[in-house]
Image: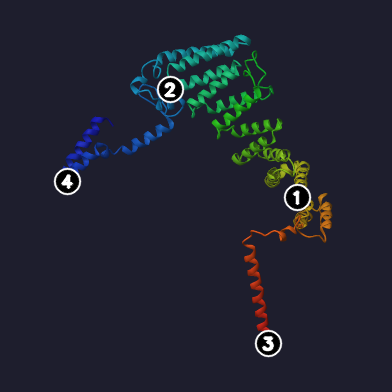
């Protein structure tokens, strides 16, 4: 609805309501014509929809309220008047030049597809540069989004994986809801998986292979997968990426990190086909991360929980791996009995036989089929006839020196009074019975 028709509608409403008096007219003048606009709700809906999806303006520019460049423009301290000046603000848009460069880049891309060897890679690199040039001439547009993706694809097929990964990240940063997300996630996962195959260190510098980063290839592969997981936590490949990270940590024998990744997959991606493997390898990681009776028991608790869930949720697969599952369950049971025996032995060495007997009784009740059952009986036999709590060293010194305990005498006096009262009650009861 244009401005003239809206103004005409407002005049009709005001002429109709003028009969209501001056207060009504004053109220209408305060509210303005917008309050009488029957399309206000539709405008608000369209505005909210555009804020979520983005839209194309009259000049063909793709307007999107999200992304790194949009945030920089909104949060810029540069006055809006200066933001359109070349060199200070946003780059001027040249649509015809952008379309021409995009067509040239497409031609180079098609030529590279039919070439081979070094020529193929060089043509893909030229196509990538041409796509980026087209993107710069028409920023915040659908063409820029497609050009950034095609530039990344060109570097990917040119086997310049570091440049390709960098362009994919820039695309996701500027266009978080890009229509190329599934393909971008797939490419980034392939690059990360490829880099994980090179266990070189950070001091191993690469100057010859364009497929690999400058150094620390394996950790860069892990970084790519972790960043992919953060950028697309609900994508189709999110569970595959999480499983890849967990398996990488398992191979590197980083057991706590592997356990955390497996648990994340189990908790977040409940419908993933990797659920059984995550339970199985997670239980193994938990047992391997256990450091002994002197340390925390959380790994054993995690292992026991995962094993019970695995048998309950995946009975068929658990039956196929029953021998390994039984072995892990037996190890959990052995380690739990070992912890109890270690605590019982510690108490027995301090001659705290009452406390030691409590731990030994738990071993005999819950872990009677372990080697620690006979050792628990020996500790119980050793404490027979001995005081439950050891006599403090030089206990006679407590009677020689005065004490500053202010509560002890009060408690002792209260106990004496209670004993006297009980004797008096018993004596009065005997007297009444005799009468």
- The disc placed on residue 343 is 1
**Would you name the residue on which mark 2 appears?**
141
| Residue at the image position 62 percent from the left and 15 percent from the top | 210
Front residue (pair 228, 199): 199
Which residue is at the far top? 119
Task: Pinpoint residue 138: horizontal percent, then vertical percent.
Answer: 42, 18
- Is residue 30 shown above or below 166? below
SS class, disc 2: loop
CA gap between label 2 and label 3 equals: 107 Å
Q: Position of residue 58 (x, y in %)?
A: 35, 23
Spot occupied by residue 251 in the image (x, y as percentages of width and height)? 71, 31
Return the x and y of residue 297 as percentages of the image width and height: 70, 45
Read off the residue under disc 4.
20
Relative to 238, is 125 above or below? above
Classify the position of the C terminus by image quarter. Answer: bottom right
Q: Earlier in the sequence, mark 1 or mark 2?
A: 2
The nearer-to-camera label among 4 and 3 is 3
Residue beneath disc 3: 433
Sequence-wise first label, 1 or 4: 4
Which of the two labelled residues, at mark 2 and mark 4, occupies the earlier sequence position? 4
- Measure the C-alpha gap from mark 1 to mark 4: 90 Å
Q: Earlier in the sequence, mark 1 or mark 3?
A: 1
- The CA distance from mark 2 to mark 4 is 51 Å
Residue at mark 4 to residue at mark 3: CA–CA distance: 102 Å
Q: Earlier in the sequence, mark 2 or mark 3?
A: 2
Q: Which mark is residue 399?
A: none
Of discs 1 and 4, which sits in the foreground? 1
Secondary element at tag 1: helix
For the point 53% across and 21% down, the residue is: 167
Which of discs 1 and 3 lies nearer the camera? The answer is 3
Q: Is residue 273 visible?
A: no
């Amino acid at each position: 609805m244009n401005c003239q028709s809206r103004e005409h509608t407002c005049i009709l409403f005001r002429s109709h309501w003028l009969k209501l008096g001056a207060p009504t007219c004053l109220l209408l003048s305060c509210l303005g014509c917008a309050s009488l606009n029957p399309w206000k709700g539709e405008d608000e809906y369209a505005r909210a929809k555009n804020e979520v999806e983005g839209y194309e303006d009259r000049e063909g520019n793709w307007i999107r309220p999200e992304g790194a460049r949009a945030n920089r423009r909104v949060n810029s301290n540069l006055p809006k008047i200066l933001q359109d000046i070349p060199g200070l603000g946003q780059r001027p848009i040249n649509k015809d030049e952008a379309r021409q460069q995009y067509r040239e880049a497409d031609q180079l891309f098609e030529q590279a597809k039919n070439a081979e060897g070094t020529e193929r890679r060089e043509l893909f690199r030229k196509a990538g540069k041409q796509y980026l040039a087209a993107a710069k001439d028409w920023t915040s547009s659908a063409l820029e989004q497609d050009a950034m993706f095609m530039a990344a694809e060109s570097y990917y097929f040119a086997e310049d994986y570091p440049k390709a990964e960098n362009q994919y990240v820039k695309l996701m940063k500027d266009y978080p809801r890009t229509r190329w997300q599934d393909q971008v996630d797939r490419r980034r996962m392939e690059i990360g998986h490829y880099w994980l195959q090179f266990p070189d260190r950070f001091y191993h510098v690469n100057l010859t292979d364009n497929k690999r980063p400058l150094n620390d290839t394996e950790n860069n592969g892990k970084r790519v997968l972790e960043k992919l997981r953060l950028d697309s936590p609900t994508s189709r490949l999110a569970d595959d990426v999480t499983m890849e990270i967990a398996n990488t940590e398992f191979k590197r024998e980083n057991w706590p990190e592997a356990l955390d990744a497996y648990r994340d997959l189990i908790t977040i991606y409940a419908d993933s086909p990797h659920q059984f493997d995550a339970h199985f390898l997670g239980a193994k990681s938990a047992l391997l991360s256990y450091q002994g009776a002197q340390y925390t028991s959380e790994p054993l608790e995690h292992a026991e929980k995962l094993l019970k869930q695995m048998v309950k949720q995946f009975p068929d697969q658990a039956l196929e791996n029953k021998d390994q599952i039984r072995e892990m369950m037996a190890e959990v049971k052995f380690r739990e009995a070992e912890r109890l025996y270690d605590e019982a032995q510690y108490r027995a060495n301090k001659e705290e036989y009452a406390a030691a007997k409590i731990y030994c009784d738990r071993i005999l009740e819950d872990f009677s089929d372990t080697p620690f059952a006979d050792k628990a009986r020996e500790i119980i036999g050793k404490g027979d006839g001995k005081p439950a709590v050891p006599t403090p060293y030089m206990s006679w010194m407590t009677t020689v020196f005065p004490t500053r305990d202010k509560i002890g005498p009060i408690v002792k006096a209260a106990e004496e009074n209670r004993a006297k009262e009980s004797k008096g009650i018993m004596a009065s009861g005997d007297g009444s019975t005799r009468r």
